[in-house]
Image: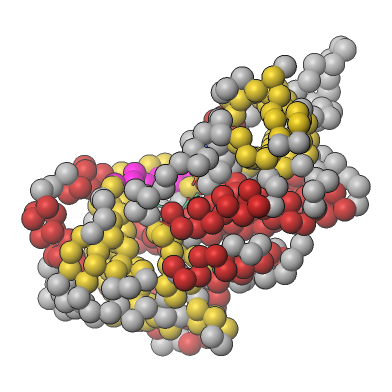
């Protein structure tokens, strides 16, 4: 057996192996090491480790609860200078060529005095800071994919649920055994598939065009979401006079638009962005991301837990995908840390059951809420338009309800895991 090598020699067993070094995997690895110390070995494998993220145009809205988590694991401090607070938000319901877009819903951005409801940050800064912190706290980083996993063979029949470890085979032929395999390997998780966990879901037939726009005037920290018939067009403030655009269209139309020559692309962009921030220019690469929805039928299997997009994929309409993934991470970290401190096995079925109970219902409700929003807005029906505008208008006039929505969107409602409340494990 080839084994993973650490700086201090060969290692053929770790306590937890995390597959996937995106936001979810890296955050979990750091939180576990910080809470359980050097005697608890955490490895993370991803072929993309160390990759150059400078071409990634995506930026994320990090809601208050997720920011508290990142602050608690001492990562936020390293990226705070790059983060733009969202100070207020305007929602409109308009047709493409409407000259005026009346605001149906406005939010001012604080969840607590002086604590913005969310910050915008470019993914590349956050990923680089997470990877650096993982190294600093002693996570074993292995730049290869998990190719397969198996349970050790025993004499005779092994009753389901009785394996003491799971053995991991990597694409580079290294192997390692672990008590808990965490699938943080994204929406197309091969671990979820190998564990025979089905998903419920569908494709939206929509794609999100993502790009960055520089503009003449300051955005003053305002986020805008324009519900156009083809789907939401979001203008999200970045540091400086720049905004991140998340622009939903039917997939064929999105592909046509991203392939347009510069001048024609600019015309399509300006038709939707308008000129309230002065002249605009697209400064980043453009890419279309196909959009879908699913929730895994189970978040756990024998010695396996799914987190992040491996467990669920939602429409970016409310900017909640990554925030939901960080909720999984905070809940799983908490149940694993509690178990290990009691001398229990972190991959035992009852420990993983606790994680699943905590996260699955919440995920289903958030997933269906974002799906409902998209269906309600992405259409041309005049009756639905009337209905949603009356609804939004009413919400706008009810400050307590609005406050509840803001706290919900900020991840601060329900049974919130410690890390998301800003408490160390
Ligand atoms: C247009 C758009 C805008 C969005 N905006 C927001 C937003 O504003 N706010 C928000 O909260 N969310 C947003 N999201 C969602 C968010 O980007 C995702 O939810 C988040 O990136 C998922 O992180 P993850 O770590 O679960 O998975 P990923 O980022 O997909 O990472 C998975 C990792 O696993 C690795 N991997 C794959 N297979 C293997 C394997 N076999 N072994 C090891 N490693 C493997 C991959 O290389 C990758 O690095 C948006 C999404 C889109 C498409």
Whether residue 323 is visible to the viewer of this picture, yes or no, is yes
The one nearer the camera, 391 or 127, is 127
Give how far across and how far down residue 202 sits, in percent. 42, 41
Q: Going 77% across and 42% down the picture, which residue do you hit?
A: 41
List x then y, in percent, for residue 337.
Answer: 80, 53
* On-image quarter of the N terminus: top right
Give, as a single range, the part of the protein colored magenta.
288-294
Task: Name the residue at 57% across, 68% down.
Answer: 77
* Outermost front residue: 8
Q: Which residue is painted at 29% across and 47% down in the image?
A: 288
Q: Please provide percent x and percent y for residue 205.
A: 31, 44
186 left or right of 232 in image: right
- Specify whether 263 is left or right of 125: left
* Residue at 60% across, 49% down: 26
Question: Which secondary structure type mostly characterizes the magenta part of the structure?
Answer: strand
Q: Nearer the viewer, residue 222 or 56?
A: 56
Q: Position of residue 121 (x, y in %)?
A: 43, 64
Position of the C terminus, as image quadrant, is bottom right
């Amino acid at each position: 057996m080839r084994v993973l090598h650490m700086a201090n020699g060969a290692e053929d067993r770790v306590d937890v192996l995390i597959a996937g070094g995106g936001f979810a995997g890296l955050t979990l690895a750091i939180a576990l090491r910080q809470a359980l110390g050097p005697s608890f070995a955490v490895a993370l494998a991803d072929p993309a480790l160390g990759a150059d993220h400078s071409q990634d145009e995506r930026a994320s809205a990090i809601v208050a609860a997720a920011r508290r988590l990142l602050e608690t694991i001492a990562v936020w401090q390293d990226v705070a200078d790059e983060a733009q607070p969202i100070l207020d938000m305007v929602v409109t319901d308009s047709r493409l060529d409407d000259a005026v877009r009346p605001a149906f819903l406005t939010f001012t951005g604080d969840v607590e005095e002086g604590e913005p409801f969310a910050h915008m940050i470019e993914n590349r800064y956050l990923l680089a800071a997470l990877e650096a912190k993982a190294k600093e706290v002693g996570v074993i980083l292995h730049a290869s994919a998990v190719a397969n996993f198996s349970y050790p063979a025993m004499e005779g029949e092994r009753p389901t649920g009785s394996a003491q470890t799971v053995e991991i085979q990597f694409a580079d032929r290294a192997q390692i055994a672990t008590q808990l395999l965490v699938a943080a390997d994204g929406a197309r998780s091969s671990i979820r598939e190998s564990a025979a966990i089905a998903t419920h879901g569908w494709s939206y037939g929509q794609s999100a065009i993502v790009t960055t726009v520089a503009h003449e005037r300051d955005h003053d920290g305002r986020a805008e979401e324009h519900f156009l018939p083809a789907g939401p067009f979001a203008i999200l403030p970045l540091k400086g006079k720049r905004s991140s655009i998340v622009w939903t269209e039917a997939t064929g139309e999105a592909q046509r638009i991203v392939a347009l020559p510069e001048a024609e692309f600019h015309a399509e962009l300006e038709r939707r962005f308008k000129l309230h921030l002065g002249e605009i220019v697209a400064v980043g690469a453009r890419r279309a991301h196909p959009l879908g929805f699913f929730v895994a039928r189970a978040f756990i299997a024998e010695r396996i837990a799914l987190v992040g997009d491996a467990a669920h994929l939602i429409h970016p309409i409310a900017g909640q995908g990554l925030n939901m993934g960080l909720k999984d991470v905070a809940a799983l970290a908490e149940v694993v840390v509690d178990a290990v401190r009691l001398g229990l096995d972190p991959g035992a079925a009852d420990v993983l059951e606790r994680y699943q109970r905590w996260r699955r219902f919440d995920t289903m409700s958030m997933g269906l809420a974002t799906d409902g929003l998209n269906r309600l807005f992405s259409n041309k029906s005049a009756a639905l338009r009337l209905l949603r505008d009356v609804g939004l208008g009413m919400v706008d006039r009810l400050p307590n309800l609005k406050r509840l929505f803001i706290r919900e969107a900020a991840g601060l409602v329900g049974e919130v895991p410690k890390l998301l409340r800003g408490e160390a494990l």
